[in-house]
């Protein structure tokens, strides 16, 4: 019984990867770089996007795909910015899933103005476990971890920390009020993903946000160079 169960999970992930590759080809055809942005609920994904996209990125037209179980709170927040925002709810057709998968992203693609953007940031559903298991056709994975979450998170949820190429450490404005040991957190981070790029930011004060904007631009340029 156990063996069968493992097999089914593997098949499901294979099927997901096939659709993710189809998404990837469509994004490439339109010259769109894709970032899969993940975190635990409330780490600050939407706030970081509000900050990053309040002003145009240098030479990069950005769009956002908002993944949520329900509601359009985050999409509404981003609607104030002058970037195209597409809402994708996992609730109606997808059983309220706790993550986005390649098929969900594929179903939303007709609503994304791919020919008008160079970069699509996909804000995944807030969850430290499941989103890490599903590729959606992204060029890069970034995660946000806030200093209120504790130093042990890389060790407890290693897959997400391991499969990301950037860890944004957010809410550093709160450090004076917390017991958070940043060195210990970074030590744990290096245990699961040695040397992974990391940046310290506060979406509240704006500290470090310029580097986050630069990273979004550099990922877009890198993807364009790969496809060309
Ligand atoms: N103090 C402080 N609060 C922040 C910072 N970034 C975000 N917040 C707050 O944290 C809360 C959650 O932020 P969101 O941006 O909604 O987080 P999220 O990751 O998009 O949340 P979900 O989409 O629900 O997973 C909000 O009340 C933000 O104002 C920060 O740098 N410092
Ligand atoms: Mg959000």
Image (cartoon, grey):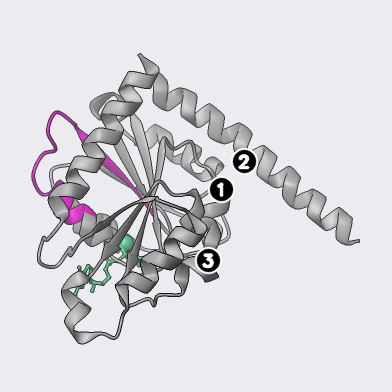
Dot 3 or dot 1, earlier in sequence: 1
User: Which residue appears at 50% of the width and 41% of the height?
Assistant: 136
The one of 122 and 104 positioned closer to us in this rendering:
122
Give x and y (percent) for residue 14: 68, 39
Q: Quadrant of the N terminus?
A: bottom right
Check the image and report above or below for 183 versus 130: below
Q: Residue at x 31, y 72 (%)?
A: 182
Q: Quadrant of residue 141?
A: top left
Q: Is mark 2 within 8 Å of ligand 1?
A: no
Left or right: where 55 falls relative to 157: left
Question: Is 116 situated left or right of 128 in this image?
Answer: left
Q: From the image, state whether disc 2 or disc 3 is nearer to you.
A: 3
Residue occupied by mark 1: 134
Which type of secondary structure does the marked residue at label 2 adopt? helix
The answer to whether marks 2 and 1 mark residues whose Cβ atoms lie closer than 8 Å is yes
Q: Is residue 90 visible?
A: no
**Disc 2 designates what residue?**
16
Q: Quadrant of ligand 1?
A: bottom left
Give the residues drawn in magenta, as a range: 49-67
Residue 62 placement, left or right of 41: left
Who is closer to the viewer here, 156 or 64?
156
Asked which secondary structure carries label 3, the reply is loop
* Residue 111 appearing in the image: yes
Residue at 14 percent across and 38 percent down: it is 57
Mark 3, residue position: 157
């Amino acid at each position: 019984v156990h063996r069968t169960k493992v097999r089914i999970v593997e098949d499901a992930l294979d099927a997901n990867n096939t659709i993710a590759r189809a998404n990837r080809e469509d994004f490439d055809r339109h010259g769109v770089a894709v970032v899969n942005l993940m975190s635990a609920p409330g780490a600050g994904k939407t706030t970081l996007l509000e900050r990053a996209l309040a002003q145009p990125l240098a030479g990069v037209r950005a769009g956002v795909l908002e993944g949520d179980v329900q509601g359009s709170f985050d999409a509404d927040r981003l609607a104030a910015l002058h970037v195209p925002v597409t809402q994708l709810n996992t609730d109606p057709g997808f059983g309220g899933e706790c993550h986005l998968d390649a098929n969900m992203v594929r179903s939303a693609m007709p609503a994304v103005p791919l020919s008008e953007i160079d970069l699509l940031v996909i804000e995944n559903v807030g969850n430290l476990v499941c989103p890490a298991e599903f590729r959606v056709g992204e060029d890069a994975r970034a995660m946000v971890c806030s200093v209120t979450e504790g130093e042990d998170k890389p060790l407890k949820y290693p897959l997400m920390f391991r499969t990301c190429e950037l860890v944004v450490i957010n809410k550093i404005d709160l450090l004076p009020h917390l017991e958070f040991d940043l060195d210990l957190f970074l030590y744990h981070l290096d245990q699961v993903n040695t040397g992974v790029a990391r940046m310290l930011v506060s979406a509240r004060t704006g500290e470090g946000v310029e580097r986050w904007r630069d990273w979004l631009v550099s990922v877009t340029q890198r993807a364009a160079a790969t496809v060309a």
